[in-house]
Image (cartoon, rainbow, N blue to C red):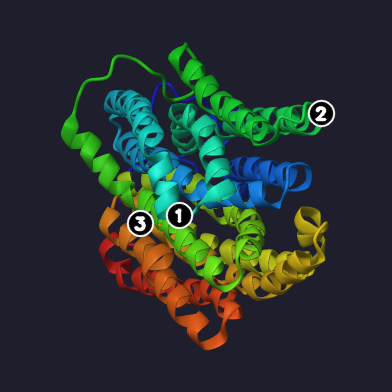
Amino acid sequence: MKTRPYYNTYKEEEVMGIQLSSHFTYKKLLRFTLPSMVMLVCTSIYGVIDGFFVSNFVGKTPFAAVNFIMPFLIILGACGFMFGTGGGALIAKTMGEGKHREAQDLFSLVVYSSAATGILLAALGLIFLCPIAAALGAEGQLLEDSVTYGRIILLAIPAYILQYAFQCLFSAAEKPVLGLAVTIAAGLTNVLLDALFVAVFHWGLIGAAAATAASQCVGGIVPLLYFARPNSSLLHLGRAKWNGRTLAKACANGSSELMSNISMSVVSMLYNVQLLAYTGEDGIAAYGVLMYVSLVFQAVFIGYSVGAAPIVGYHYGAQDHAEMKGLLKKSLTLVSLFALAMFGAAYALAGPLSFLFVGYDSNLFQLTVGAFYIFSFSFLFCGFPIFGSAFFTALNNGLVSAGISFLRTLAFQAAAVLAFPLLWGVDGIWASTAAAEALAMGVAILCLWKMRGKYGY
């Protein structure tokens, strides 16, 4: 086993706090990953806040429009996760190998590439937004509202992509708490502006979209300014040396997270098509509530995985197999506990959360509560494939990571949502997510078991 490299830039652990090179107990692992979990939860809450204000202050059709167009916007923002997770894992591995200068260059390249991609996607999105919404089946007021909301969000897509990238890169820089602070600031921006623009000024969808766009600018631009200046983290922005091969490797490694977000968005569009056929706009509104809650609850698993990935990547680079084995065992235990907690909370809060969003419509409320009870079982399973995919990303095995994500978020989901309604009607749509997550959990566990010899964990 190789010794762990030590950088002159590091201070003693009791001064700096927990480092990537530390031995991780349960307590240290939770302390290091908690900021990432809270950060992702806060990020997910922005959309929930938008949904709450739009549903209660603007109306049911605008609420359905936000949920209808959001998957397309998430696909664009997901590029930030690709750069952040893939680049963060490669940066952590490079630092674990003692190549600190190379890690700095890669960090700058990843950030600048994220920004450039955001500008390109914003331009393309503005051109194709209306045709895409129409092709998905939106028409009349639903189409008009979807385009109104989407065009404003697209103006902030470059910052949105940077925000997602930095959420992952803060952990690699050993600054997860700072990342949490930035995310909280962005979330508070969204909450306050939503209340002001929608509830006070009555700007409707335009106000909700403007509030979200402003919060994304805070989340993406503030970290950019921090890393561009001298700072106390392990990483800072400088002149980036173009290295297409290394950038391609980072993108390929993060492709599983990109695939996961794109697949979930594509499947959400498929759900919307199915729900329009079976229940009309009420079904889309009910599904929107489920997705808001799912985003928040799954953010716990995603945040933990994002926070733990640089640790795994560092110890993989240092060839510390004993620490990797301990990290995997502890992580699976924690994910199991999170799964039980998420399922219990979702089942118990089905009524109150449904009432919070759609309590003004009794039929829609009953539909949403019934869907919630069935959908909540998905939280028992989803954490394992989420962590499994991130674990292999940290090991720089993008192929296995992407395979788990593809099966979880696209193949199993699409098959279930097409087949289950034929057997059980609209209840089959709600049950399809849990079935797909259970299958994906089995695949993730099988991959972890099969690859244990290769990586020594």
Closer to the camera: disc 1 or disc 3?
1
* Residue to which mark 2 is pinned: 200
On screen, residue 304 above or below 406? above
Can the viewer see residue 20? yes
For this rendering, which residue is in front, 191 or 422? 422
Question: Mark 2: which amino acid?
Answer: Val
Q: Residue furthest front?
A: 140
Kind of element beneath mark 3: helix
Local packing at callout 3 (Cα closer than 10 Å; few below 14, some 14-19, many 20+) is many
Question: Mark 3: which amino acid?
Answer: Phe
Could you say which quadrant of the image residue 291 lies in? bottom right
Kind of element beneath mark 2: helix
Could you say which quadrant of the image residue 113 lies in? top left
* Residue to which mark 3 is pinned: 392
First in residue order: circle 3 vs circle 2: 2
Q: Where is residue 347 in the image (x, y as percent from the top left)?
A: 74, 70
Q: Which residue is drawn at 46% across and 19% down?
A: 227
Could you say which quadrant of the image residue 414 lies in? bottom left
Q: Position of residue 379 (x, y in %)?
A: 60, 67
Question: Mark 1: which amino acid?
Answer: Ser
Distance of label 1 from label 3 (alpha carbons): 22 Å
Residue 167 numbered tag: none
For this rendering, which residue is in front, 318 or 248? 248
Residue 265 numbered tag: 1
